[in-house]
Image: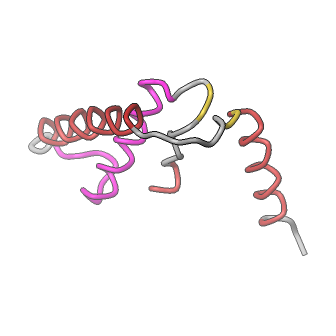
Amino acid sequence: MCRNIRTLHNFEPAASDDEVHAAALQYVRKIAGTTKPSKANQEVFDRAVEEVAHLTRHLVDDLVTNAPAKDREVEAAKAKTRAAKRYAPG
């Protein structure tokens, strides 16, 4: 589950609210040990996702770096190349 959480800091354009929410959702799923909570736990699960997303947004916005921002498309191409090598037959 957690391999879907991507680095959100120091990208241009900056991480969207949807990306932050998706990372928070994956984190809470991992911690809770479920991808779909029961009806009894739905409210607390949703609240945890919102709180983690809120704190993640603050973290990403407040982090400071001297490194130049990474280009999302370039980084995605690098990841695709690494995956192709990793999963290549033979």
Q: Residue 69 appears in which quarter of the rendering?
A: top right
Q: Quadrant of the N terminus?
A: bottom left
Q: Is residue 2 above or below residue 38?
A: below
Q: Nearer the viewer, residue 46 or 54?
A: 54
Residue pictured at 9% horizontal, 43% vertical? 40
Q: Is residue 30 above or below residue 54?
A: below
Q: Nearer the viewer, residue 70 or 80?
A: 70
Q: Main secondary structure of the magenta part?
A: helix
Whether residue 37 is in magenta: the answer is: yes
Residue at position x 42%, y 42% in the image: 23
* Residue appearing at x 78%, y 48% in the figure: 78
* Residue 57 image offset from top left, x and y in percent: 35, 32
Colour scheme of the picture: secondary structure
Coordinates of residue 47 in the picture (x, y in percent): 16, 35
As drawn, is 64 to the left or to the right of 34?
Answer: right
Residue 15, horizontal then vertical, whole percent: 50, 29
Image coordinates for residue 16, horizontal then vertical, percent: 48, 24
On the rendered image, what quadrant is the C terminus found in? bottom right
- Outermost residue, right side: 90
Stretch in magenta: 15-38
